[in-house]
Image: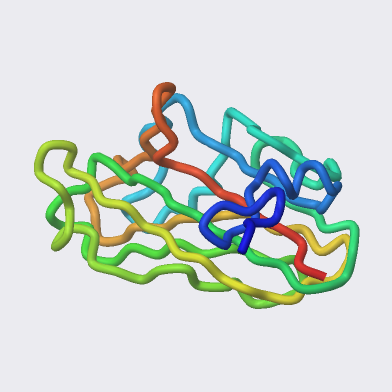
Amino acid sequence: MSTPVGFKNGILTALQWKATGQPCFFANLLADVNNQTGNGGVATVAFDQLLWNTGGQFSAGTTFTPLYEGNYVFSANILVQAISAAMTIGQLYMTVQGSSPILLQLTNPAAVREASISGTTLGNTIYTRLSAGQQCTLQCTLVNGAGNTAGFRGDASSIITYWSGMFLG
């Protein structure tokens, strides 16, 4: 049995989605963004590289605005660094205009932080239904720290902090 064009191991590739014009985006963080959260500060994750933006629905490094009502899948991975031992609650969520935020992850970042970077990743994949024009952002909050000293790690040589989304129909 032959593999259909655009499929690899049974998965439709991102290149194939671009070729069909399917609305999708993939944003990446290249440079570190420091002192964003830690004492309850709410930080909107701002991405500095847009790898693709089919349909032009991702803008200003922070906001996704769907053109179509329908089902969407989003995936995010944020490497949070400079976490202190006191920062015991960490949340990563997607805000949705006119709706309650969608929680991607709730954890104790101090308990799972990697010692070499004093950091950990927060992330997940979610499926949701959106209305056309309903703006979405990705936000992170860490609490119980002495100040907003935690930030997001970027990397120009690999993709470690990203947010992606795709219209499913």
Image coordinates of residue 35 in percent, x first then y, are 36, 36
Q: In which quarter of the image is the C terminus?
A: bottom right
Does residue 90 appear left or right of residue 46 in this picture? left
| Left or right of 96 on screen, residue 33 | left
Nearer-the-camera pick, 62 or 129: 129
Query: In the rendering, at what x and y percent does residue 50 appear?
Result: 65, 33
Residue ID at (88%, 70%): 69
Look at the picture and state if 133 lies above or below 131.
Answer: above
Which of 135 and 41 lies nearest the eye of the viewer? Answer: 135
Residue 159 against residue 21 in the figure, above or below: above
Tell me residue 25's x, y (percent).
Answer: 69, 46
Q: Residue at x 77, y 43 (%)?
A: 18
Task: Give above or below for 164 relative to 53.
Answer: below
In this rendering, position of residue 116 left or right of residue 88: left
Q: Hey, which quadrant is residue 105 in on the image?
A: bottom left
Q: Is residue 115 left or right of residue 64?
A: left
> Residue at point 66% right, 37% down?
61
- Quadrant of residue 149 within the rendered picture: top left
